[in-house]
Amino acid sequence: MILRMIAPGKRKGPEMRGSRLFLSLLISIVLLVLAGCDFTTEDRNGKAMSVKKGITEPAAGIKSLTCFKCHPYKEFSRVFPHDLHIRAGLHCTQCHIIKSHKTHALNKETCKKCHNLTVLNMKTSSMPVRFNHEKHTEMFDCKDCHTEVFPMKLNGKKIIMDEIFKGKYCGK
């Protein structure tokens, strides 16, 4: 019906302008409806992603990680284009091997999934301070950061909470 309304040579003058106006309004309405839609899809890692107005963010987002409850995201994004990788559905622990607050290593296997790199050369960052467990335990439970159980080894070294608070076991 719409095609018949705007077929060239069939209608002229005000009737043709009315048909064009109708078609323009119809297209505008469809575009406005689609622009406000929130689509959910999966990234290549199987994580749910929200796609809204051309921007993709991992659902639940990186900011849900315990670290970002206190530390601003910009603090972790000074050297490397993290936003591009977040939009691709990656999160911190897929690229970084983080052990306590020591210098974190890069998981190059994650990079190789998308990049054909022979040499990976970039500035590295670290957290050169002693991690203050005492301060953090005022705000968080141990399980908030340490999500896995650490089984004690037979005849292993005894770990004392006071020594943890002094930074003996992690971060220098």
Image (cartoon, rainbow, N blue to C red):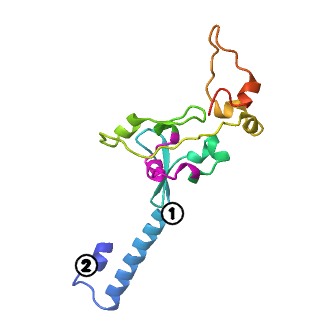
Q: Is residue 86 part of the magenta span, yes or no?
A: yes
Residue that appears at 56% across and 31% down: 99
Q: Amino acid at mark 1?
A: Gly
- The span picked out in magenta is 75-92
Residue that appears at 70% across and 19% down: 159
Does the rendering let one see residue 166?
Answer: yes
Location of residue 93 in the rendering, given as x and y in whole percent from the top left corner: 51, 37
Location of residue 74 in the rendering, given as x and y in whole percent from the top left corner: 57, 53
Q: Which quadrant of the rendered structure holds the N terminus? A: bottom left
Task: Identify the secondary structure beneath mark 1.
Answer: loop
In the displayed structure, 10 sits above or below 172; it is below
Mark 1, other Cα within 10 Å: few <14 / some 14–19 / many ≥20: few
Q: Which mark is residue 70?
A: none
Q: Which residue is mark 1?
A: 36
Q: Which mark is residue 7?
A: 2
Does the rendering let one see residue 60?
Answer: no
Q: Residue 141's quadrant in the figure?
A: top right
Looking at the image, which residue sits at the far left?
A: 9
In the displayed structure, 143 sits above or below 68; it is above
Residue that appears at 65% across and 26% down: 169
Q: Amino acid at mark 2?
A: Ala
Asked if the residues shown at circle 2 and circle 1 are in contact, with their CB atoms under 8 angstroms apart, the answer is: no
Q: Is residue 156 part of the magenta span, yes or no?
A: no
Give left or right: position of 57 versus 117.
right
In this view, the residue in front, 11 or 63, is: 63
Give left or right: position of 166 versus 152.
right
